[in-house]
Image (spheres, helix red, strand yellow):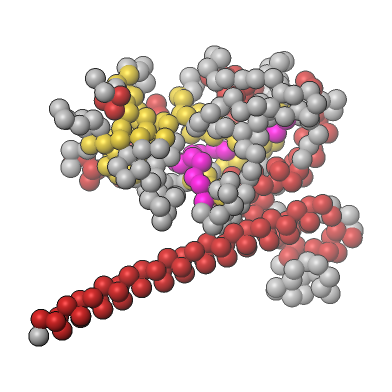
Amino acid sequence: MSRSTFHQAQPYSLADYGWDEACEHAFAPHRDAGLVPARVVRAERGSCEAVTDAGILRAEIPGAADQKNPLSPPCTGDWAALRPATTSHGPVLHAVLERRTALVRSTASRTSRGQVLAANIDTVAVTVSLGTPLKHGRTERMLALAWESGAQPVVVLTKADRCADARRAAAEVSEVAPGTDVLVTSAVTGLGLDTLAAVLNGTVVLLGPSGAGKSTVGNQLLGEERLATAAVRDVDGKGRHTTAWRELVPLPGGGVLLDTPGLRAIGLHDAQDGLEQTFAEIEHLAQECRFTDCAHVSEPGCAVLAAVEAGEIPRRRLDSYRQLLRENAYAASRTDARLRTDREAAKKDITRHLRATYQFRERQL
């Protein structure tokens, strides 16, 4: 039997992976066409592993990837319609249902294209290690991605047993995470794990750099050592990639866990709304600035600069806000330029085709 038709028995149903009435309604036209509902648990180039009520199977992804739109290939978390296997061919992914939420970052190459890390997620657990000095700028980046996804962010502070003052650290992080629960946890002592399990909802994605403790937290939630873990380096507190790909795993208490590889680069991609939510206090103050297009640099009547001078907002926080705004604007301009190029290329193709048609007709006269 070929790899593409491999089936694996499982103790879970599709409902354990999040299938609900909304999914059933969206899938109705595909069911009428004889297709099978599935959720992508692991996506690779040209194929994917998907869970169905009959088990986990490997399905072919025809066309591999749309070169003009890298956001379109299926990714972990997608709901899909599969064409069942036949005597001559294995299962084929026929369509991907519309994504309810999507966690998207810029590609590692810093091109104008985005990369979907996970789809149809409900909670983004932004993991931050207390075993190393806090890097608020990185936390703000991850929160911007999380808010932009449409899911609910939760900041999970890990390795509290290695922090001299975890309460103070939590207060610091809370100041850069408005509107977000900040939970202090320790896999060693068990601190905060019950609260974390109660707060997480639906499909949960663990987001953070290598060494932040994502897989360790995941294993605590799963109740077993299923996800690979490794010790971090003593010299800088950084960890190695122990998660090689994104994968969905049902949680014993309900919901689904999505562990991701550690992210070395967290570039923003069209994350304006996420930035506004991440820096909500600055956005609120900006409404009181004298000028509607105030850049909060040296303009007279700037309410944000006044708050910085009064010590109400840290200068670092404003600098981070402006830096991420510039980065996001640059990414958006590159995307707009690429879209204009694609449109111009399409127009040229149409013109070339029409010219060839007219020349052919003239030769027939």
Residue 201 visible (yes or no): no
- As for residue 115 lying within the magenta part, the answer is yes
Q: Quadrant of residue 34?
A: top left
Q: Nearer the viewer, residue 328 or 162?
A: 328
Q: Which residues are drawn in magenta?
A: 114-129
Check the image and report above or below for 203 versus 10: below
Residue 290 image position (x, y, % from top left): 77, 75
- As for residue 127 lying within the magenta part, the answer is yes
Judge left or right: residue 308 versus residue 200.
Answer: right
Q: Nearer the viewer, residue 141 or 240?
A: 240
Q: Residue at x 56, y 27 (%)?
A: 243
Check the image and report above or below for 345 versus 317: below
Judge left or right: residue 287 versus residue 109.
Answer: right
Judge left or right: residue 64 versus residue 164.
Answer: left
Q: Residue at x 45, y 24 (%)?
A: 250
Q: Residue at x 40, y 37 (%)?
A: 45
Residue 313 visible (yes or no): yes
Q: Residue at x 54, y 57 (%)?
A: 112
Quadrant location, the C terminus: bottom left
Q: Quadrant of residue 285?
A: bottom right
